[in-house]
Image (spheres, rainbow, N blue to C red):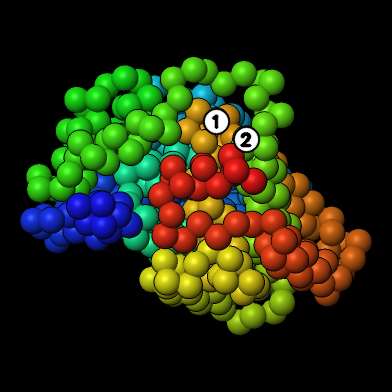
Amino acid sequence: MAAEESRYLLGGPAPGSDRRVRNEKLYLATFAAVLGPLSFGFVLGYSSPVIPELRKISDPELRLDSNQASWFGSVVTLGAAAGGILGGYLVDKVGRKLSLMLCSVPYVFGYIVIISAQNVWMLYFGRMLTGLASGITSLVVPVYISEVSHPKVRGMLGSCVQLMVVTGILGAYIAGLILKWRWLAVLCSFPSCIMLFFMSFMPETPRFLLNQNKRSEAIAALRFLRGPHADHEWECTQIEASVQEEGLNLSEFKNPSIYRPLLIGVSLMFFQQVTGINAFMFYAETIFEDANFKDSRMASVVVGSIQVCFTAVAALIIDKTGRKVLLYISGFALGWGPVPWLVISEIFPLKARGISSGACVLTNWVMAFLVTKEFNDLVGFLTSYGTFWLFSAFCCLNVTFTAFYVPETKGQTLEQIEAYFRRS
């Protein structure tokens, strides 16, 4: 019986279970959650087709100069940094599911402000609100997916977060070919509304419910996610063994089981942004215009399509190759896009998951702001060649950091990963 339970824990079918049905429900929950990253991707991609249009618009109250354009592109990251802090609080206080449902509000309201904008400050405010929602989303969705998944498919499902982000970016690029900026904002508001509808039918994660002493609800969630024939009681017992009811206090950050994964997570987020990817994605069309491409909009669509294709490849192979192998591949879509978000959703102990994830998301978006806001200044100071050589140097440092400090988490339960940091 122990061998059968071990196979089940690693994602295999429990005796007598219908694996297809179990996975369908799990995939449905994942689909509902990743509509959040799709919304997040539309936020990131929105600025690329819109900035050239707003720089040429006839209305002087809305027309952007070079400095205003850089703020329009980068201010979303300040909202996202605040969203990371707020998300770290919400995810532990109200749960993973409700946090996702709540972040639909600033998404929609932010786009309403943009659509009705009469001046540049309204544009900034709308971008800040959509950024706030993006920050909450980027924290909560990886946590939700990692906690509802079983180890055999957790890597693939976790990688779908970044896949949907780049799909949203590509969607904004393509829609920007035919839609004016106000109508593009209308389109970008749809995914968050659909997410709110679907998430209302999805369960809370079993780990959060058990941490709230709601065992019967956790069993019901496992029955939804694993199917009626799986051994819900046994899995619930395994999770309960690692759930610690006492709260987290600051003195516990001296414990290696908490500070080591936190340092790894913060470093991964730092290195992800200093590759310069968001500077490129926010200003893709402007960059291609400056490079004298005949059709800068279509060039941006091509770049977005490549991102989607290779992120999909990463999602398909990550549970076979492991996390570290993909991080040795310097390409962003294959490694440094999806993997850091997956790793930070796996390595934190349950009681520190909210605050540690919040610190990582805050680091990510503060660095994103610095890189995107100062990109034009870097180009002016170092030239385009020097700026991209600098980003390349950070890519090399990424690989070195991965080799020495990032643990491999492939095929392990969240409880096993937590035990690894307690032992080390």
Query: In the depicted view, which residue is nearer to us: 395 or 60?
Result: 395
Query: In the depicted view, which residue is nearer to us: 377 or 330?
Result: 330
Residue under the image location 72 percent in, 61 percent down? 404
- Nearest to viewer (mark 1 / mark 2): 2
Report the side of 203 relative to 282 (left or right).
left
Q: Residues within 10 Å of mark 2 (few under 14, many from 20)?
A: many
Query: In the depicted view, which residue is nearer to us: 184 or 11?
Result: 11
Residue 172 location, x and y as percent? 45, 59
Marks 1 and 2 close (CB-CB < 8 Å): yes
Residue under the image location 46 percent in, 61 percent down? 410
| Rendered position, 93 above or below 272 | above
For residue 390, say whether it is visible.
Answer: yes
Report the side of 60 relative to 313 (left or right).
right
Residue under the image location 69 percent in, 56 percent down? 405
Which residue type carries mark 1? Ala
Alpha-carbon span between mark 1 and mark 2: 7 Å
Residue 79 location, x and y as percent? 59, 35
**Residue under pointer 2:** 258
Residue 262 location, x and y as percent? 64, 40
Q: Which mark is residue 342?
A: none
| Rendered position, 258 above or below 300 | above
Report the side of 306 relative to 149 (left or right).
right
Q: Which mark is residue 352?
A: 1
For residue 170, say whether it is visible.
Answer: no
Residue under the image location 69 percent in, 21 percent down? 251
